[in-house]
Amino acid sequence: MAIIENRKIQLYRDDAISFLKKLPDGSIDIIISDPAYSGMNQRLKIGSGKIVGKYTKGENNGRWFMEFGDSEENYEQFLAECYRVLRSNRHIYLMFDSYSLITLAPVVRRVFEIKNLICWDKVRIGLGYYFRRRHEFVIMASKGKRAISLRGIPDVWRINRVNSYRYPTQKPTEVFQLMLKASAERGFMVCDPFFGSGSSAIAAIKENCRFVGSDISETAIKFATERVNQFLKYGVDVFQKDSLLGDDEMLRKIFREGLV
């Protein structure tokens, strides 16, 4: 059952694989997602990933959310379902940290045709064990052939990280909006099987798309539901009130004028 449902937005509480299996073949126009990968946490001993659909007793075991068990077996199953539900000649965008990119990018290539690797420059420096991190990656891939709408979008996106957050992995809506500006059309069905803070859902609304997504975390459900409801009712994103675009004039022009 949907947690929130109207003509355009449907949010479900479910694990990614179970959720995707319930969607009809070829029902999705674009997938945009930031999976909660477990790989780096496992290696750094700061968390433990779980097989998709199997979670420890008690919500999150003291953490904000459960990670996605990013073994090749799990990831191949996840990508196979993504491929099935995605319409032909459509795009998928998947976010990666550096560790998950190295281990899982070859799996993506076995299922989809990788078109580019995008670097999200967070502008403000973060934490790091060897070098302090200021970036994440996005793999853009396709099922069939489809050109992007805006050829002037660079492959480095200077967008500030979310500093004042209530959900720990909250991403700027502008990151997801750029994916949609490049690959979506008005009315497209956007899917995010790991919607987390709901930034992808807000981006879909802003870009005049429909949205369907899921998350296993009760915290994510509560956060995203409140956020989406407030935006649908008042047109205000209560958890990201200001633009987080960096000083890249090209990106500013894209958001200001819509075309490059």
Image (tube, rainbow, N blue to C red):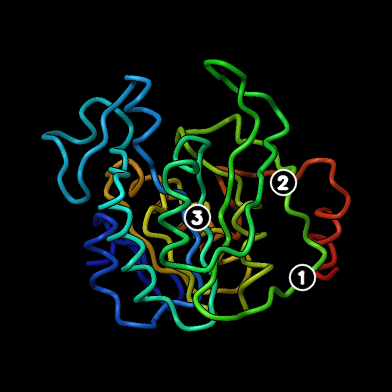
Is the residue 184 above or below the residue 107 in the image? below
Q: Residue pushed farthest top?
A: 129
- Disc 2 crowd rating (10 Å Cα; few below 14, some 14-19, many 20+) is few
Question: x and y percent of residue 25 in the render?
Answer: 32, 82
Q: Which residue is mark 1?
A: 150
Is the residue 10 above or below the residue 46 in the image? below
- Mark 3 / mark 2, whichever is N-terminal: 3
Q: Which mark is residue 98?
A: none
Q: Amino acid at mark 1?
A: Leu
Q: Amino acid at mark 2?
A: Ser
- Mark 1 / mark 3, whichever is N-terminal: 3
Give the number of the mark in front: 2 or 1. 1
163 with respect to 52 (left or right): right
Using the rendered view, name the quadrant where residue 79 is placed.
bottom left
In the rendered structure, are the residues bearing label 2 and label 1 in contact, judged by CB atoms less than 8 Å apart? no
Q: Which residue is mark 3?
A: 94
Which of 102/149 is in front? Answer: 102
Is the residue 119 above or below the residue 39 in the image? below
The C terminus sits in image quarter: bottom right
The N terminus sits in image quarter: bottom left
- Mark 2 / mark 1, whichever is N-terminal: 1
235 with respect to 259 (left or right): left
Q: Amino acid at mark 3?
A: Leu
Quick one: SS at disc 2?
loop
Quick one: SS at disc 3?
strand
Give the number of the mark in front: 3 or 2. 3
Q: Which residue is mark 2?
A: 243
Residue, x 38% and y 41% (percent of image)? 37
Residue, x 86% and y 55% (percent of image)? 250
